[in-house]
Image (cartoon, grey):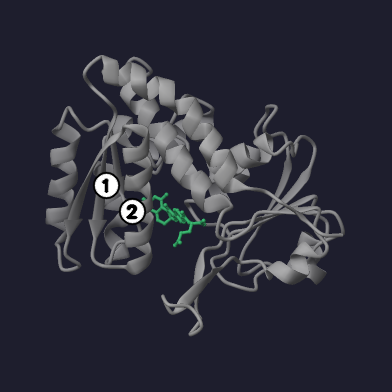
């Protein structure tokens, strides 16, 4: 079998087209949607993701601003930056790009973002609301995966989904979204992680495998059944002297061996990454539409 590619770039473009009239309606009121991005330090991957996010905003007519702080910025400086953006009426959405140089302050920084501006869906209020099935900003990567599957015609209803990786921003919320009731969910979910015994024994039972461990080679062809669907969330830079930039991107799945057995697979790049950005745009537009707190 040769796997069908699940084209995240194409589906993301479709989502952007659906957002376009909503952005235009907001712009017509004189208040286009506004996104503020906070970036701390000089992590090259963060710079590349933030640049892609700002470009996507500009293309759609969302006003974006970037607040770049040095790696040496203190906890108080970062919190003060977020608090200023909380008070700024032109800012509908606030995103603090993770990881922070000092990851121990991430919970405090996330918690200071006003929940109605938390377009990443990371604030405890949004996490709690999501868990309870109340209206909430959904985290962009897991929501992007749900949309990519649905818009690619892959049903999760009654399916066994095995997720490898229990992160707070991907694996854990995805397990929740896919196991809840509803047409884009209703899956039976197994959440695997670094301490899982016999990982392959789990992944081989899956109709859909999500590789979200952040490590290349997490999933190999011999770990899936013929005809499984594979969602590869990894974005890993591996050294490649043959490239001008000195690296290439690989996912968490060993693409060759997995694609030879799978029915469908998301490529890296061009799979989940663009979907993450599309869902950020969608959350920002929703934040602007809900301005003033109509939904909460
Ligand atoms: N606060 N921090 C916050 N929100 C997020 O949603 C993120 N994430 C993750 C890292 N930190 C965050 C992202 O934005 C990962 N992530 C992300 C976003 C976009 C892409 C990858 C990861 C992406 O566009 N990937 C492209 C290739 C990009 C490249 O060339 O480097 C792709 O096609 O996969």
* Earlier residue among tags 1 and 2: 1
**Disc 1 crowd, CA 10 A, few/some/many (<14, 14-19, 20+):** many
For numbered disc 2, what is the local secondary structure?
helix
Q: Quadrant of residue 97?
A: bottom left
Name the residue at 67% across, 48% down.
6
Q: Is mark 1 within 8 Å of ligand 1?
A: no
Q: Nearer the viewer, residue 3 or 135?
A: 3
Q: Is residue 185 left or right of residue 55?
A: right
Q: Which residue is mark 2?
A: 50
Q: Nearer the viewer, residue 163 or 125?
A: 163
Whether pointer 1 and pointer 2 mark residues with C-beta atoms closer than 8 Å, the reply is yes
Q: Is residue 243 left or right of residue 46?
A: right
Image quarter (top left, top right, bottom left or bottom right) of the N terminus = bottom right
Residue 157, horizontal then vertical, whole percent? 76, 34
Residue 32, horizontal then vertical, whole percent? 27, 25
**Ligand 1 visible in quadrant:** bottom left
For numbered disc 1, what is the local secondary structure?
strand
Q: Nearer the viewer, residue 139 or 228?
A: 228
Name the residue at 35% across, 57% down.
98
Image label count = 2
Tell me the distance, in whole angstroms, between the alpha carbons under discs 1 and 2. Answer: 8 Å
Image quarter (top left, top right, bottom left or bottom right) of the C terminus = top left
Q: Which residue is mark 1?
A: 37
- The residue at the far bottom in this view is 241
Q: Which mark is residue 154?
A: none
Asked if 77 appears above or below 187 in the picture, the reply is: below
Q: Is residue 209 left or right of residue 95?
A: right
Name the residue at 36% across, 24% down.
23
Residue 60, horizontal then vertical, whole percent? 37, 34
Asked if 15 appears above or below 290 in the picture, the reply is: below
**Disc 2 crowd, CA 10 A, few/some/many (<14, 14-19, 20+):** many
């Amino acid at each position: 079998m040769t796997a069908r590619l699940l084209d995240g770039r194409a589906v993301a473009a479709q989502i952007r087209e659906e957002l376009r009239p909503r952005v235009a309606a907001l712009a017509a009121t004189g208040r286009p949607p506004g996104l503020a991005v906070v970036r701390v330090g000089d992590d090259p991957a963060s710079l590349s993701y933030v640049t892609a996010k700002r470009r996507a905003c500009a293309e759609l007519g969302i006003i974006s601003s970037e607040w770049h702080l040095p790696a040496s910025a203190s906890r108080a400086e970062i919190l003060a930056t977020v608090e200023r953006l909380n008070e700024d009426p032109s800012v509908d959405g606030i995103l603090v790009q993770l990881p922070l140089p000092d990851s121990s302050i991430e919970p405090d920084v996330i918690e200071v973002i006003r929940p109605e501006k938390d377009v990443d869906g990371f604030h405890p209020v949004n996490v709690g609301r999501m868990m309870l099935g109340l209206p909430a900003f959904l985290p962009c990567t897991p929501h992007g995966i749900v949309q990519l599957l649905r818009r690619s015609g892959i049903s999760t209803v009654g399916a066994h989904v095995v997720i490898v990786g229990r992160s707070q921003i991907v694996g854990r919320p995805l397990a929740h979204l896919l196991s809840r009731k509803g047409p884009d969910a209703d899956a039976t979910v197994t959440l695997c992680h670094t301490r899982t015994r016999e990982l392959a024994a789990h992944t081989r039972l899956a109709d859909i495998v999500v590789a979200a461990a952040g490590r290349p080679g997490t999933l190999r062809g011999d770990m899936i059944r013929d005809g499984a669907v594979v969602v590869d969330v990894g974005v890993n830079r591996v050294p490649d002297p043959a490239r001008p930039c000195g690296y290439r991107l690989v996912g968490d799945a060993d693409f060759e061996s997995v694609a030879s057995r799978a029915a469908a697979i998301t490529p890296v790049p061009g799979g989940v990454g663009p979907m993450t950005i599309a869902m950020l745009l969608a959350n920002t537009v929703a934040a602007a539409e809900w301005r003033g707190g109509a939904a909460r």
